[in-house]
Image (spheres, rainbow, N blue to C red):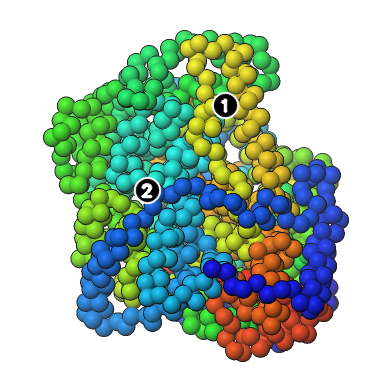
């Protein structure tokens, strides 16, 4: 697939030497600035773990069925037909179709969350087959990068963070989400699993969804309905909203379904499901361990107690009545009166009439008859691909906030149902539309006229897309570290509190701390793929939430406390990071992907190679001339190359998705 | 210094600055008044440099009962005791000893009330005076302040946010130039502000010029607010890199005893940074403090948190006063809503929008005032209820901003700085 590698000529050899001088300057700068406490920082140069090509794929991803291609085309055509009618109706003109270069860049960013490499771009452009776009879509949807990108997408929605509270060790849940994407678990199955999971994070990491709002049963209902049904009932938690249809009474009626959720393992816990052990832990054992730790472990006691609590945390369910708040102020009921379970709409499926409240809630939620569940995810995934939802914001479906194209939204909802909630196939259909494969269109959310999808909306890359794109230019292996699997964490975190002595707990804590304690995991990353204080790895595999000053946070990655908290607005620190930050300079180092790519081509091709690497297209004739002049007139060719790469990274064209 | 300024004489950079000037009008032609000029003649005359603001934003909702509105003797009070202040008869929570000593400099408002008990919406309302809606983004108070009063420094930004920019409404529909510059960590200041050692000024300029030329077609094709906002940030970043005032961002230049005095907390060091920035000519500084959302085990975390606030804010007020800056600087302490008087089953307090407390001090504010009151349980306003819009209109009035004036946004609709709020005259000097 790769282009022919040209032997290094005399002139390239001299350029190579010059490039080393540039890299050398970086090294000396780092050395000058080195502070005494940054001994972990590499002295310069790229870590081996990222410059060596991996010898196997990062993970096995559920395969995509190429035989469905005709069906996908038909599904895409049906969507295009609706849009074409709409364009005619409103007299709008579709945006021009993407050429191959624009397509190969956009589709990589859309499905793999990064720009294509030089090799990927050139291979696609040189491919003459008529179905190459379909084939590329299929390949990307079954790639580890797809898993990484959609993990980032869901992490923003589900507020995935490693320590949502001091007593919660959440890595197993994070790994579970990633794994659900990797195996392409059907969305309805996935949601049901999370809404009804029992046990501890070690044995059943799906409990993380319920534990994310540990101690806040009412916000849990609010957040769950907001994320899964695109409906905001949160205001009704405190009062009847004057403009909203939901009353406080209705909120409590819905919350009554899950009111019996317990987050601390106790004697009352139900036996586990088949295959999953959910052991009841008598609280006295926990109390005794906590007491002993307090009395005998001095300064370490606080950490040990958190560790004990983490092991005593798990989900169980037994119906419990929910009462109205003490300050309930409306005439239809009295304060502290118990409420009866009632759904927002629809009814409990007959098959679970006798099941517990949580089971009924979950079954109602994911039932095919609960169209709003399918509609919400259809709108969400449409927005992921086209940039704008048919309902905006995507979590505020209301009569007063109707979809911009009801027919299309219902059509997409049908498609989700027809695909049995296979979201990956849904995305496959949408990116296969001719509407998607058009140039981006400016979307003004304040405009009076709704967006008509004459092409996808112009968007800045998300923080993760930008990071992973830059890493693509630097690291041949961006997967040198992966986030720990659920079982790996459980191995060092799980303690059976019914039988363990405090010494046992402490031994296990030490093992856990040694690997995942504050600073320890980071140090491992630094040693493996660190470069001037940055880790050259996939954004999805990094610790989370990252500190506010990290490149990803500067570019708007969520703090993972707000649902869909990621942003793409410009700030000055972003620009400074692109100008002067370590990550944009990593690619000027010997051994970076772009460096090696330039060096393995004829000098005559340098400018084209750089354009194809960074912007995924050949330069226009005058740009090629400008760039050649720049390299020719720079102090030396290496500096000229560095200037050109830097300049391309600092264009709007680079960070916006055309 | 001079050599740095040469950058702006570069024709290409100059062109981009001209682009900026044109951009300032783009989409905002209906907004009367140009940045830097007071908008209307009948406003009270400002001191030549105008008023500065340091706003401390307590994210997650600060418990009013445990801070500025204690209810001693009630079961709602929980574990926090009340202490006397420098105003006879007025009490604060026990973890605010220093601010209790400064109570005669403060205006405490105890009757704020709002409808929303959701953090995101509540914070948005507090920052903009408007409910969050889908069809428009409203400007934050700081952006209004810089828009109306102008910047005080040529190179430094008008508006700095010490904290997380993600949830911030920013400049709303105003010119992107009024977007706050986020500082992630006050200890680290403005990062990546200097060129790498191997990159000469001349080479940096070449790179900028080259990027500009290559980007020309793309920018033309997608000309609009999104791209323009990024262009603006690039221009501002270049200008900032050439500024001689960058030391303002570097709190390590303060002596150790000063840094200790503010407290080694994020808020403490953030307040110190805010003081330095205001001294150097930044108009509006917002400092965030996270972690007030105490649904469980409130009294395990609250004493430390309130203590940090006490140390930081008291030191800030003391320093500003000692330097004669309190007359020209308004200090605001705000939060999105209060916390429930009822203590929940997890020994925490839940969201409580019905009543909460905020504090003003300094420029334009009458010192030693308590305005409004909550009822005996701390549940609802007992008298003189104050909306968030009223509170912001009060801030606007204290700064001399035209709170009554209507500004027309690009969508043709009128907006006011404090929305429909009326200033509380009783707390204005």
The residue at the point 29 percent across, 60 percent down is A68
**Dot 1 lies on which element?**
helix
Q: Is residue A555 visible?
A: no
| A204 versus A228 height, above or below | above
Position of B266 with respect to A414 (left or right) is right
Q: Which mark is residue A492?
A: 1
Residue A616 figure quarter: bottom right
- Are the two marked residues, 1 and 2, in contact with CB atoms closer than 8 angstroms? no
**Residue A383: % across, % down:** 36, 61
Foreground: A245 or B213? B213
Pointer 1 or 2: first along the chain? 2
Residue at screen point 69% across, 20% down = A299
Q: Residue at x 82, y 72 (%)?
A: A18
Query: Circle 2 — which element?
Result: loop
Would residue B16 be found to the left or right of residue B358 on screen? Answer: right
Work out which residue is located at the far left of the displayed protein and give it.
Answer: A350
| Viewer-side residue, A491 vs B375 | A491
Question: Mark 2: few, some, or many residues within 10 Å (few <14, many ≥20)?
Answer: many
Q: Residues within 10 Å of mark 1 (few under 14, many from 20)?
A: some
**Res. A330 image quadrant:** top left
Question: For mark 2, what is the residue?
Answer: A184
């Amino acid at each position: 697939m790769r282009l022919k590698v040209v032997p290094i000529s005399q002139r390239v050899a001299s350029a190579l030497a010059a490039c080393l001088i540039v890299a050398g300057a970086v090294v000396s700068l780092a050395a000058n600035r080195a502070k005494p406490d940054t001994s972990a920082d590499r002295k310069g140069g790229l870590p081996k773990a990222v410059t060596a090509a991996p010898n196997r794929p990062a993970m096995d991803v559920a395969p995509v069925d190429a035989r469905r291609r005709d069906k996908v085309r038909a599904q895409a055509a049906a969507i295009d037909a609706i849009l074409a009618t709409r364009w005619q109706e409103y007299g709008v003109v579709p945006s021009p179709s993407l050429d191959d270069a624009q397509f190969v860049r956009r589709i990589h960013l859309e499905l793999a969350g990064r720009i294509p490499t030089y090799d990927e771009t050139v291979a696609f452009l040189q491919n003459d087959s008529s179905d190459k776009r379909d084939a590329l879509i299929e390949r990307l949807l079954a790639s580890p990068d797809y898993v990484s990108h959609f993990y980032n997408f869901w992490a923003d929605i589900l507020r995935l963070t490693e320590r949502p509270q001091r007593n919660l060790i959440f890595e197993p849940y994070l790994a579970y989400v990633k794994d659900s994407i990797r195996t392409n678990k059907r969305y309805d199955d996935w949601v049901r699993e999370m809404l009804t999971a029992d046990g501890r994070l070690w044995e059943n990491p799906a409990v993380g969804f319920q534990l994310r709002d540990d101690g806040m049963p009412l916000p849990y209902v609010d957040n769950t309905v907001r994320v899964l049904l695109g409906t905001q009932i949160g205001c009704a938690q405190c009062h009847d909203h004057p403009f909203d249809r939901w009353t406080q009474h209705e909120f409590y009626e819905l919350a009554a379904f899950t009111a019996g959720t317990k987050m601390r393992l106790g004697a009352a816990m139900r036996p586990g499901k088949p295959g999953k052990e959910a052991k009841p832990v008598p609280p006295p054992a926990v109390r005794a361990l906590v007491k002993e730790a307090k009395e005998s472990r001095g300064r370490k006691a606080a950490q040990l107690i958190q560790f004990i609590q983490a092991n005593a945390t798990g989900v169980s369910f037994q119906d419990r009545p929910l009462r109205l708040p003490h300050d309930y102020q409306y005439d239809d009921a009295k304060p502290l009166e118990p409420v009866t379970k009632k759904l927002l709409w629809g009814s409990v499926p007959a098959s679970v009439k006798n099941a517990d409240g949580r089971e009924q809630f979950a079954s109602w939620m994911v039932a095919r008859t609960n169209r709003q569940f399918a509609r919400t995810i259809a709108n969400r995934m449409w927005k992921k691909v086209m940039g704008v939802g048919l309902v905006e914001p995507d979590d505020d479906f209301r009569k007063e906030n109707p979809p911009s194209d009801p027919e299309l939204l219902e059509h997409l909802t049908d498609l989700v149902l027809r695909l049995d909630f296979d979201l990956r196939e849904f995305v496959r259909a949408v990116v296969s539309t001719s509407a998607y494969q058009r140039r981006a269109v400016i979307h003004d959310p304040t405009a009076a006229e709704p967006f008509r999808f004459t092409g996808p909306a112009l968007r800045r890359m998300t923080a993760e897309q930008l990071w992973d794109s830059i890493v693509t230019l630097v690291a041949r292996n961006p997967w040198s570290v992966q986030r720990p699997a659920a079982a790996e964490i459980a191995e060092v975190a799980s303690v059976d509190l019914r039988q363990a002595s405090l010494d046992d707990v402490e031994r296990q804590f030490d093992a856990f701390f040694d690997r995942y304690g504050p600073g320890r995991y980071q140090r491992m990353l630094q040693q493996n793929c660190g470069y001037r204080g940055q880790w050259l790895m996939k954004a999805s595999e990094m610790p989370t939430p990252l500190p506010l000053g990290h490149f990803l946070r500067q570019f708007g990655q969520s703090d993972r406390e707000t649902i869909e908290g990621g942003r793409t607005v410009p700030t000055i620190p972003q620009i400074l990071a692109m100008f002067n930050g370590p990550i944009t300079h990593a690619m000027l180092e010997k051994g970076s992907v772009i460096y090696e790519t330039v060096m393995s081509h004829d000098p005559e091709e340098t400018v084209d190679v750089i354009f194809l690497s960074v912007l995924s297209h050949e330069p226009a004739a005058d740009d090629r001339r400008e760039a050649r002049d720049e390299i020719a007139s720079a102090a030396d060719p290496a500096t000229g190359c560095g200037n050109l790469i830097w300049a391309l990274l600092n264009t709007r064209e680079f960070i916006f998705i055309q | 210094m001079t050599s740095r300024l040469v950058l702006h004489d570069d024709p290409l950079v100059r062109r981009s600055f001209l682009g900026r000037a044109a951009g300032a009008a783009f989409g905002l032609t209906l907004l009367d008044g140009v940045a830097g000029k007071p908008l209307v003649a009948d406003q009270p005359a400002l001191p030549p440099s105008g008023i500065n603001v340091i706003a401390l934003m307590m994210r997650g909702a600060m418990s009013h009962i445990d801070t500025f509105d204690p209810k001693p003797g009630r079961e709602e009070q929980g574990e926090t005791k009340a202490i006397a202040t420098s105003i006879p008869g007025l009490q604060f929570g026990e973890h605010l000893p220093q601010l209790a000593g400064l109570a005669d400099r403060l205006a405490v408002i105890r009757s704020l009330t709002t409808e929303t008990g959701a953090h995101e919406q509540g914070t948005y309302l507090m920052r903009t005076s408007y409910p969050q809606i889908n069809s428009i983004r409203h400007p934050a108070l700081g952006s209004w302040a810089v828009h109306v009063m102008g910047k005080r420094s040529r190179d430094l930004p008008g508006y700095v946010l010490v904290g997380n920019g993600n949830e911030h409404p920013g400049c709303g529909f105003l010119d992107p130039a009024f977007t706050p510059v986020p500082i992630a960590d006050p200890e680290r200041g403005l990062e990546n502000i200097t060129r790498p050692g191997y990159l000469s000024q001349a080479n940096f300029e070449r790179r900028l010029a080259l990027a500009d030329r290559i980007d020309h077609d793309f920018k033309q094709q997608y000309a609009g607010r999104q791209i323009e906002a990024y262009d603006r940030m690039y221009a501002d970043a270049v200008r900032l890199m050439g500024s001689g005032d960058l030391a303002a961002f570097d709190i390590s230049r303060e002596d150790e005893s000063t840094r200790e005095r503010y407290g080694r907390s994020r808020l403490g060091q953030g307040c110190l940074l805010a003081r330095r920035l205001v001294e150097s000519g930044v108009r509006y500084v917002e400092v965030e403090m996270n972690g007030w959302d105490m649904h469980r085990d409130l009294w395990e975390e609250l004493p430390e948190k309130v203590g940090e606030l006490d140390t930081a804010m008291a030191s800030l007020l003391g320093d500003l006063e000692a330097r004669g800056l309190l007359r020209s600087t308004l200090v605001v302490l705000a939060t999105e809503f209060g916390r429930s008087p009822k203590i929940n089953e997890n020994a925490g307090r839940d969201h409580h929008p019905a009543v909460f407390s905020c504090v003003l001090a300094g420029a334009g504010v009458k010192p030693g005032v308590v305005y409004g009151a909550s009822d005996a349980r701390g549940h609802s306003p007992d008298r003189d209820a104050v909306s968030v819009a009223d509170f912001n209109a009060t801030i606007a009035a204290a700064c001399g901003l035209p709170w009554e004036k209507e500004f027309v946004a690009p969508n043709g609709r009128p907006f006011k700085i404090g929305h429909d709020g009326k200033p509380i005259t009783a707390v204005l000097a």
